[in-house]
């Protein structure tokens, strides 16, 4: 880990100080973040966009950005790492999100850490937070769809204990999944 965290007294909110001195705020996505997401999207490389969205996207339309910013907190989680600047200037450097699938106890996650802040351990940190949210929601599984040539994400998932299975829909995609509540499942019952 090449950063320090300072809890800010509100759920999921922390100040992040990178070892090179840059400062970011970790906080839940806000419904007003659409324009910030659009500006931040423009800084991503085509490769990063393809890895995150699984296909090329030229720009985030205002409607799509607003959709990404509007979170139903009962079923979804989204955490951003954002510069500590006024909203009209700040850029979002990373996002992790998860959404519970209807009528299941599993959630799909997606993550992006922009190259300007990659390699500091922030991907691992954000994955830890989304796993924590999933455990609080008592989900049975969190999983993500990863392009099969996306070595950084596959390695990160493996380090976090995720397993792999082939996607039923797409040959180029691997699903990485983490079974949750293992401790609860393996714990002895009241009679021992
Ligand atoms: C994958 C991604 C999230 C990693 O973010 P990051 O902040 O750079 O990752 P971290 O610094 O936390 O690294 C954590 C681990 O990931 C692995 N990793 C990260 N970058 C890597 C790279 N370029 N090559 C190989 N492994 C890498 C390593 O195992 C690393 O652990 P280590 O430092 O102990 O070796 C980031 O590269 C990204 O957003 N990529 C584009 C979008 C994407 O692929 N999303 C996944 C689709 S769901």
Image: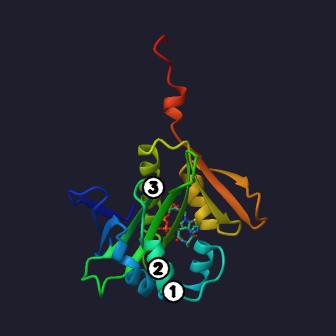
Q: Residue at x 71, y 66 (%)?
A: 148
Q: Residue at x 57, y 78 (%)?
A: 48
Give the class, few, some or many, for how many residues have Cα within 10 Å of label 3's Cα (few <14, many ≥20).
many
The numbered mark, 1 or 3, whose residue comes first in the sequence reads 1
- Relative placement, left or right, of 103 versus 114 is right
**Marks 1 and 3 close (CB-CB < 8 Å):** no
Q: CA distance from mark 3 to mark 2?
A: 21 Å
Secondary structure of the residue carrying tag 3 is helix
**Marks 3 and 2 close (CB-CB < 8 Å):** no
Disc nearest the viewer among 1 and 3: 1
Q: Position of residue 62 (x, y in %)?
A: 46, 85
Q: Vertical placement of 176 versus 58: above or below?
A: above
Give the class, few, some or many, for how many residues have Cα within 10 Å of label 2's Cα (few <14, many ≥20).
many
Q: Position of residue 190 (x, y in %)?
A: 45, 14
Label annotation for residue 65: 2
**Marks 2 and 1 close (CB-CB < 8 Å):** yes
Secondary structure of the residue carrying tag 1 is loop
Residue nearest the viewer, comparing 122 with 167: 167
Q: Which residue is mark 3?
A: 130
Q: Residue at x 36, y 82 (%)?
A: 91
The numbered mark, 3 or 2, whose residue comes first in the sequence reads 2
Q: Which residue is mark 1?
A: 61
Q: CA distance from mark 1 to mark 3?
A: 26 Å
């Amino acid at each position: 880990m090449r950063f320090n965290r300072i809890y800010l007294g509100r759920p999921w909110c922390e100040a992040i100080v990178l070892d090179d001195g840059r400062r970011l705020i970790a906080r839940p996505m806000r419904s007003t973040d659409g324009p910030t997401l659009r500006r931040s999207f423009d800084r991503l490389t085509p490769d990063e966009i393809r890895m995150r969205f699984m296909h090329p996207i030229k720009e985030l339309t205002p409607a799509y950005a607003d959709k990404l910013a509007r979170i139903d907190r009962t079923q979804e989680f989204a955490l951003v790492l954002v510069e500590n600047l006024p909203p009209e200037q700040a850029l979002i450097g990373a996002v992790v999100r998860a959404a519970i699938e209807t009528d299941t106890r599993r959630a799909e996650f997606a993550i992006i850490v922009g190259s300007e802040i990659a390699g500091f351990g922030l991907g691992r940190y954000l994955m830890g937070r989304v796993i924590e949210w999933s455990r609080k929601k008592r989900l049975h599984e969190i999983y993500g769809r990863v392009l099969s040539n996306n070595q950084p994400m596959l390695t990160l998932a493996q380090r976090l204990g995720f397993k792999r299975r082939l996607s039923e829909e797409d040959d180029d995609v691997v699903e990485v999944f983490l079974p949750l509540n293992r401790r609860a499942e393996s714990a002895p019952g009241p009679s021992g």
